[in-house]
Each structure stands twice: as structure tokens, then as C-alpha cells.
Amino acid sequence: IIGHYSIKYNIVSLPAPITMLDFQLNIITIVTVFAGFSFSVLGLLISLSSAKIMEKLSETSILEESCKIITKSIIVFMVTFFVALYFISGIYLFIEKTLNLNRSLIYSLEIGYLLLGIIIFLHSVYRMVYMLHYIFKDNQKDVITKKQVYEEAENIILNEMNDFHDTDE
């Protein structure tokens, strides 16, 4: 859809052939960075799965849905990566002649997938931040409870020490 309208209304224009290679290399750099961040978010999500609260979340669809969103962003970035390789390798020259495909359409799809990948990535980061907030909020409750237990134990020990000290005199 994006490719069709970008050609129809000339929204996205192809770079000159001289700068196309540099542009595609920049696209590959951008895509691999975002895919790497997506893998990092996925790794963080998996490493947090041992947390007590994550065990509760694993019973819901929240954890599974977050993994699906992250995986979707990785797949979209990989499609963009392969389209960039399509232009870099020169395969597009053969395909254009054989299948009569419009280069602008493929280029517009590449840009569209890049933007879609970034949007999905931002959505996955938002979900991850929400889960981290939820986890730390639950951990904060545990900390407050542990602090109260510690302070009570400390008071008991101090009272016993004072009582012991008073009996010595």
C-alpha cells in the first residue's frame, strides 16, 4: 500500500544510482542496529523470566505477546535487510528486465518496512518498560516488607542487648 501510493503521488523518490549503494549500506547499518536492539530486548525479557513476578505473568498472554512483537520487529528488519541486499547485489537489474518490476515499488516497500520495523520496535520497548515498571513495583513492595521485618528484628536484638547490659551492672 505504501509503495503504491508513494509511486502514485511521488512521495518517495529513488536516490541517484551513484548514491544508491551508499544509501543501501546506510539502510543495512540502521536495520542491523535495530535488529540488535530487538535481540537485546528479547534477551532481557528471557532473562527476566526467572523473576517471581514474571512467573505470574507467564500464566497470562502478556509475556507471549511481548515475545511475538519483538520477533515480528526482527523479521521486518530482516526483510528490509534482504531488500537492501537486493539493490546492493545488482539482482534488481536482472529482475527488472525479467519480471518487469518497478524499482520504485521495491524501494518504497523497503522504506515502508524500515518504518514499520521501527514502529514495532518502539512498541516492544514500550511493553518492556511497562513490564520492568511492574516488576520493580512488585520488588519494591518486597523491599518494604523486608525492611519492616529487619527493623523489628533489630529492635528486639537492641532491647535484649540493653536488658543484658542492665543485668551486668
Image (cartoon, rainbow, N blue to C red):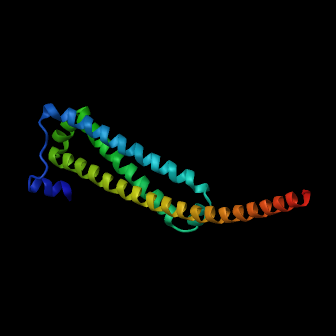
Q: Quadrant of the N terminus?
A: bottom left
Examine the rendered structure and indicate whether residue 22 appears above or below residue 108.
above
The picture places residue 149, in percent across and down from the top left corner, at 71, 64
Specify whether residue 91 is in view. no
Q: Residue at x 40, y 59 (%)?
A: 126
Examine the rendered structure and indicate whether residue 57 appears above or below residue 37.
below
Q: Residue at x 42, y 48 (%)?
A: 38
Examine the rendered structure and indicate whether residue 74 appears above or below residue 148.
above
Residue 23, image quadrant: top left
Q: Quadrant of the C terminus?
A: bottom right
Residue farthest right in this picture:
168
Residue farthest front in this picture:
169
The picture places residue 107, in percent across and down from the top left corner, at 20, 45
Examine the rendered structure and indicate whether residue 72 appears above or below residue 100.
below
Residue farthest left in this picture:
9
The picture places residue 120, in percent across and down from the top left corner, at 35, 56
What is the count of numbered marks?
A: 0
Q: Residue at x 54, y 52 (%)?
A: 46
Specify whether residue 29 is in view. yes
Who is closer to the viewer here, 4 or 56?
56
- Is 111 placed left or right of 56 in the picture? left
Who is closer to the viewer here, 5 or 145?
145
- Is 148 placed left or right of 158 in the picture? left
Residue 87, image quadrant: top left
- Is 139 placed left or right of 164 in the picture? left
Who is closer to the viewer here, 78 or 147?
147
Residue farthest top in this picture:
18
Q: Residue at x 24, y 47 (%)?
A: 110
Who is closer to the viewer here, 58 or 107?
58
The picture places residue 122, in percent across and down from the top left corner, at 35, 55
